[in-house]
């Protein structure tokens, strides 16, 4: 049976076969499918790198700042909490806003009572930290704990990637040092 109906069916089959066999746009479609997850992965990697790099920078700054207390320089110069915080800030070159640095210096009665844990932060209605930080660099022979913390802004990543660890959606990073002040000479 040949006729106009059969010719339409044959022509339709040929068009379908030509469409199914055409792979000119396949690369573009594959690229579009792979791009979104690839960019999500790159953004997550960059954000993770920045958080870990900032954490290591803060660790380095705390170790250098702890030496000022341990060697008695803070005590001999009778530094205030603000002056010591400025010394900490002077060592920070990138990544941190000095107004966001929080410094806590405490004397511990023994090594077992030295609190090097991350302090919980409290916020007011404007989202500002309301904690009151101690500043007691101690005297010769005292066990001292220096904790420096910072609220790191976190950008929510694609696909639900989130590095925040505090209620306001940011990440609290902290570095601490526990040491015994050198005896005075």
Image: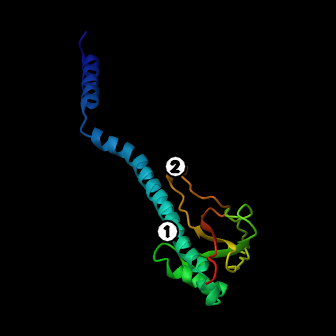
- Which of 62 and 74 lies nearest the eye of the viewer? 74
Residue name at image x 73 percent, y 77 percent: 132
Residue 92 x/y as whole percent = 49, 77
Residue 114 x/y as whole percent = 71, 65
Tell me the element at label 1. helix
- Which of 183 and 160 lies nearest the eye of the viewer? 183
Residue 57 x/y as whole percent = 49, 68
* Image side of residue 172 versus residue 24, left or right: right
Instruction: Tell me how many marks there are.
Output: 2
Neighbourhood count class around disc 2 (C-alpha, 10 Å): few under 14, some 14–19, many 20 upward: few
Q: Is residue 97 visible?
A: yes
The quarter of the image holding the N terminus is top left
Tell me the tag on residue 57. 1
Q: Are marks 2 and 1 in contact (CB under 8 Å)?
A: no
Above-or-below relation of 129 to 21: below
Residue closest to the far front: 185
Above-or-below relation of 39 to 143: above
Residue 100 x/y as whole percent = 60, 76
Neighbourhood count class around disc 1 (C-alpha, 10 Å): few under 14, some 14–19, many 20 upward: some
Q: Pointer 2: what residue?
A: 159
Does label 2 or label 1 sit earlier along the sequence? Answer: 1
């Amino acid at each position: 049976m040949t006729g106009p109906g059969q010719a339409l069916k044959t022509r339709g089959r040929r068009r379908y076969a030509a469409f199914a066999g055409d792979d000119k746009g396949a690369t573009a479609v594959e690229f579009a499918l792979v791009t979104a997850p690839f960019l999500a992965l790159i953004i997550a990697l960059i954000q993770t790198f920045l958080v870990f790099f900032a954490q290591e920078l803060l660790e380095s700054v705390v170790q250098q700042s702890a030496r000022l207390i341990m060697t008695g320089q803070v005590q001999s110069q009778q530094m205030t909490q603000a002056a010591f915080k400025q010394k900490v800030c002077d060592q920070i070159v990138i990544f941190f806003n000095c107004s966001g640095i929080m410094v806590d210096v405490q004397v511990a009665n023994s090594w077992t009572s030295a609190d090097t844990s991350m302090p919980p932060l409290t916020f007011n209605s404007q989202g500002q930290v309301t904690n009151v930080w101690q500043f007691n660099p101690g005297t010769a022979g005292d066990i001292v704990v220096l904790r420096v913390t910072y609220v790191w802004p976190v950008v929510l990543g694609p696909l639900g990637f989130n590095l925040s660890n505090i209620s306001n959606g940011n990440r609290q990073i902290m570095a601490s040092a526990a040491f015994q002040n050198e005896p005075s000479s």
